[in-house]
Image: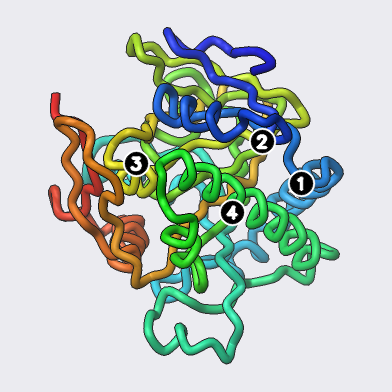
Amino acid sequence: MARNYALGVAGIPVINLQGDNAGRLLDRAWREVGFAAVTGHSVDLGLFAKMRSLTQEVFSLREETKQRFQITAKNYRGFVPFGFFSPNRGEVTGVLPDAYEAFKLHWECPVEHSVRQECALYGNNQWLSEVAGMEETVLTYWSACDDLANLLLALSAAALDLDPLSLSCCFTAPLTNMTLLHYPTQPAGADFGIHPHKDTNVFTLLHPDPVGGLEVLGRDGSWISVNCPPEALLINTGEMMEVWSGGHYAATPHRVINRGPDRFSFPYFMVPNHDVVVKPLVPVKPSFVATPMPVGVLTAEVWRTNWRNQLPVPHTFALGSLRQ
């Protein structure tokens, strides 16, 4: 382990994937922290700069263009207006909106793929002709993230004594998605870029903006700023991996604070096929509670409740939690 960054008691490890003990160190990180900064990955470092530049260009477009390519209730792909997402229902809940705008992308599902007839969540991305080379750049980066995510999945399966195919077979037509994000500078008291939350997916891959702003909940209950080596990708385990691992891997709460200059990021969220049922695959950790959940049902509920007039159904879609 090259070094640690402070995170309450545990610290976020920096793990070289080329090391012989990478799998063991990842297993420890998932159990203790739920986060790791990985180096020695196969992602071309030049892609980070290209994706950041592209993301900045996307959000520099005119508002008229953003409105023309805005998401709809039937196609969750395209621009997401500032202050739109959950819990962005201040008029209902009194909670301040999250201070960011976004552009949603999903796995590029072939038009002829039969899964389109099985599940309405699959569809076409909106590629912007106003941003030169957008499709090529995003898909090149996406492919590199796929390769890295698959490696992380295989290493984690081995650490849990699972047949690697028991996990890899769940991603033949994935609901994996990516979000281009812009967090404008906000005044004190209204600076939640994204409210505290756990990711619901398997793995999240993020190349953090040097501006900072990402904070992770430490074991002592304090919020700790995350600093990541510029060549590293920050990985965290989501609730689906937490449930697959029987609660042994942690889905750790995190948030974004907009106190500095404008922040841009482009996280990749690894999500299985729509018909996969997430349930523990190893003996469950004591006191861990997991409710089996079809991935498509969960994803549809996330999409539905992002609209201002749609409130979540209590408890129905909780993947898993530790009893207090």
The residue carrying mark 4 is 150
Contact between marks 1 and 2 (CB within 8 A): the answer is: yes
- The location of residue 223, given as percent across then percent down, is 43, 15
Type of the residue with mark 1:
Val
Secondary structure state at the residue bearing disc 2: strand
Q: How many marks?
A: 4
Between the residue at mark 3 and the residue at mark 4, the CA separation in whole angstroms equals 17 Å
> Which residue carries the number 2 mark?
233
Depth check, front residue: 319 or 88:
319
Among numbered discs 1 and 2, the one appearing first in the sequence: 1
Please name the residue that numbered disc 1 is placed on: 43
Q: Label 3 belongs to which residue?
A: 242
Residue at the (34%, 42%) spot, across then down: 245
Amino acid type at circle 4 is Asn
Q: What type is the residue that disc 3 sits on?
A: Glu
Of callouts 3 and 4, the N-terminal one: 4
Mark 2 surroundings: few (<14), some (14-19) or many (≥20) residues within 10 A: many
Residue 226 sits above or below residue 246 on the image = above
Whichever of callouts 1 and 4 sits on the residue coming sooner in the sequence is: 1
**What residue is drawn where x is 57% and y is 68%?**
107
Q: Amino acid at mark 2?
A: Leu
